[in-house]
Amino acid sequence: MRPDFLWGVATSAFQLEGSVHADWTAWDPALQSKPDVTRHYHLFREDLKLLKELGVNAYRFSVEWSRIQPEEDRWNDEAIQHYQEIVRILRQNNIEPMVTLHHFTNPQWFSERYPWHEAHSVSKFLNYVEKVASALKDVKYWITINEPYVLLLGGYLEGCMPPGIQNFQSFLKALEYLLRSHQEAYDLLHSIRRDAMVSIAHNMATFAPCQKWNPFDRLLSRFAQFFYNRSLLDAFLTGRLKIKFPFVRSIEMDVPIEGKLDFFGVNYYTRIHLRFNPLRKMGVELKHKDMERQGVSDMGWEIHPHGLERVLREVSKLRIPIIITENGIATDDDGKKEKFIKSHVDVIEGCLKKQIDVRGYFYWSLLDNYEWLRGFDARFGLYRVDYDTLKRKPTVAAAFYSYIIKSRSIF
Ligand code: FCB
């Protein structure tokens, strides 16, 4: 194992801890019966020991804004100390922390008064970033915003995530303010720590036409590839964001993010097939197909390791280090989980041999946890959680991941 390659696991605070002050709590009735999900907020010391057991040298986790700032004019020092304690334990164990500042959830007051499509959202978010960054000076790796496109497609076009809006103009506004927040957070983190390594985590997928012969399906998959994967990369290169959706006037806007990245965080899970269907929004229907007989996950997502190479090649055009900030599978079947990990790590190994600058891999996730829009039955964890007793039990894939970390000399 090369000491500088980050071998880790990733989690998010809300998915392990819940939070009564977060907008998502009221959004999903499934959380009513399990408001503190895995009770990680109280059991964190035990959970952090699992990192040692796995032998990882890095851990990506998030801090929950709604715990740190439950009311607009109230900071919760206890929560800040809690996250400081996590960083202290990680450092003590030589595990590099990577902290996500925003992982989908907002404090309820923020969602009500300054949602992302309102200009004040930027300064409200920045106050919080300043508080966290000055409390966690020992942290070098930061993710400002997890999956901006997923957050906005879900929250502002599809309407399936808070704030549940379906409006293209609000989507564009929210996108502008979210990217401005990233830029300001980037500058702030660097003013506090010059050697900070800052990125977003961008959800990327590969796209294919449902029916290869169908020109509409082919066109849609080109649109998706360009918008979903590429447009944000280009915006980081040029400071200009171009959005082209089928049947909608294309949009171009200046965004102040040119060069505002020290590495690029990629979340990769699957390939998506697209079908033209005039009855659907923008004529798009998404499908998951088991094309190569590698199977699908319990989320129904196709297992498609080769897509990761395509995505990494695309990202390598940025000419900065790449870190895979999430990759994982929801399944009860340990053998399938092992195969998933092995096949994706093999692809990364191949990419390293081709001089693609990958510097880290974070498996999603350490423990089973709450999955957005889905509940508690999507088992992504290397450790299985029994939701009645809250006991954690290693899956066979946990031992396998440890073995991979130890045995891959190229990394
Ligand atoms: C990603 C999210 C993460 C988790 C995985 C399965 O899109 O960032 O929180 O839910 O999907």
Image (tube, rainbow, N blue to C red):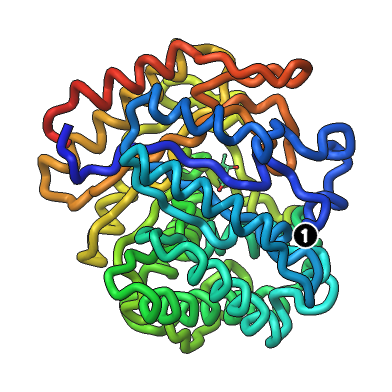
**In this orientation, does residue 15 appear?**
yes
Residue at image coords 12%, 29%? 409
> In front: 323, or 336?
323
Residue at image coords 46%, 60%? 143
Q: Position of residue 343 (x, y in %)?
A: 32, 25
Which quarter of the rendering shows the C terminus? top left
Q: Is residue 323 above or below residue 305?
A: below
- Sort mark 1 into few (<14), some (14-19) or many (20+) by Cα contacts within 10 Å: many
Residue at the spot of label 1: 162
Q: Is residue 173 above or below residue 97?
A: below
Q: Position of residue 27 (x, y in %)?
A: 84, 51
Q: Is residue 254 above or below residue 11?
A: below
Residue at image coords 66%, 55%? 79
User: In the shown orientation, is residue 59 left or right of residue 248?
Assistant: left
Which quarter of the rendering shows the N terminus? top left
Q: Amino acid at mark 1?
A: Pro
